[in-house]
Image (cartoon, rainbow, N blue to C red):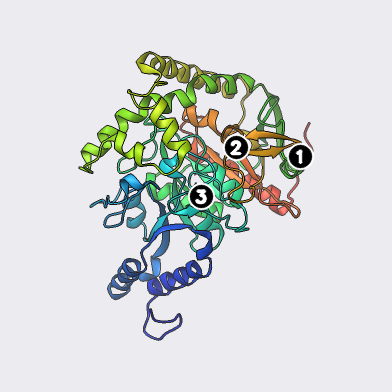
Amino acid sequence: MVEPGTAGRGPAQEAVAAALERAAAVAHLNAFITLDAEGAGAEAARHDRRGGGARRWCLVVKDNVHVAGLPNTAGTPGLAGFVPTADAPVVAALRAAGAIVLGKTNMHELALGVTSGNPTFGAVGNGTDPALFAGGSSGGTAAAVASGIVDAGLGTDTGGSVGIPAALNGIYGLRPSAGRYPSAGVTPLSVTRDTPGPMARTLDRLAALDAFVTGRTGAAPPPDRALRLGLPRHVFTEDLDAPVRAAWEAAVARLGTARTVWVPVDTGHLVESDARAGMHLVLGEFAAAFDRYLAAHRIGRSTAEVVDAAADPAVSELLGAAALPTGPAYPGPAALRRAVAERRALQAAYAELFAANGVDAILSPTVPVCARPLHRNEESLRLNGRDVPTFPTLIRNTSPSATAGLPSVTVPLPVDGSPPVGLQLVGPRGGDRELLAVAARIDALLRRGEAGDARP
């Protein structure tokens, strides 16, 4: 490849060359499963020849979202030979807005995990410190964005797979409302809970990605109106890692002296409801959705064969035992019906919480802990002097709103010498643009120290 700065190369080629140079410099992160240097360079050259290169920008895409002509492994050996012939609609929308796909990013196998410790393609290192895990399941996208390879990328989110790695890598992430983004061309886990979601290095870029995909913009809350922010009484703000607690308490104090009103809200029942619905939806929906996916794309393998070939024992054992109809712990149709009913109750509880308290968003730390060292915390980690299971600990704050299909935005909090910490904002369903605007006001207050009238 021609070195950056060579005469005659257009702006799109310059952008791709710079991204590839940075990708090479941080290759140790294992952010990519497929880095498409040749394809991205050729696409950039075409746009430069046509005179449209100036508006082109580089994008990375999680390896369970289809990109035409590139493998779509979903991080698992059983899909390694599958190459889609068409872009997923969400990718097509971003291409139409100027994106050049640089490659497909590494992930937790089949999107069923929170560290991106992939045994086939290597563990993903954190974009701020390669000795730490990136979080998951969209860890490769988060690492690529945080390390400066690209400004933006696509992940997917079932129970926190955008918010968790965004928080742990110190970038911005959006889980959109259920159904807001098209789900075609995405390897499924749970049709009820799955959604594509963008990540970016700036909130402006995140909002732009959302507008590119949906074609929608929204008005911000009036700047002279104080924000009403839900302050959880239970669970979401309890049992936090020391750096997370310090960053969270500093944010609460800072916002308490700005034009905000803190409104205490009860949230324990939301966590209890999610426990009765969230994972049961995944286990009850996986097999049928995956069967349809394999058949629609003529992949030539059965769901059982893909699960049997999984390299991560935790993934293979959980799906084989509890998500396949032949498994000894398969919950069955009645359990799925109960989970669907519980999800409706959870949605009603969230709607009542927003209506009764008049809050613009419910705030909490995105993840109760900071990123931990690679390879040593897949099953458990230390939290406040005791060993706790990794998966439920990392999804504790993200899963309830994800199960309910609500939008959430992760904003990086200012930290003092610790790994990144994320702030989660959850809004009412369908209020994605308004939530992004609330996030922009909060982000400005936290980063510039803006303060207005003191509020109780």
Separation of marks 3 and 1 at Cα, in angstroms:
27 Å
N-term-proximal mark, 1 vs 2: 1
Residue at left 31%, top 54%?
A: 71
Q: Is residue 292 left or right of residue 452?
A: left
Residue at left 54%, top 45%?
A: 115
Quarter of the image with the N terminus is bottom left
Of circles 3 and 2, which is in front? 2
N-term-proximal mark, 3 vs 2: 3
N-term-proximal mark, 3 vs 1: 3
Residue pointed to by mark 1: 249
Q: In the displayed structure, would residue 202 be above or below residue 242?
A: below
Q: Is residue 200 visible?
A: no
Q: Farthest bottom residue? A: 7
Q: In the rendered image, which quarter is residue 262 located in?
A: top right
Separation of marks 3 and 2 at Cα, in angstroms:
15 Å
Residue 48: horizontal and vertical position, in percent?
Answer: 32, 74
Residue pointed to by mark 3: 139
Quarter of the image with the C terminus is top right
Query: For mark 1, does the 10 Å Cα neighbourhood hold few (<14), some (14 to 19), or many (20 or more) residues?
Result: some
Which mark is on residue 436? none
Of circles 1 and 2, which is in front? 2
Q: Is residue 140 left or right of residue 328?
A: right
Q: In the displayed structure, would residue 340 be above or below residue 43?
A: above
The three-letter amino acid code for the residue at tag 1 is Glu
Q: Is residue 125 left or right of residue 20?
A: right
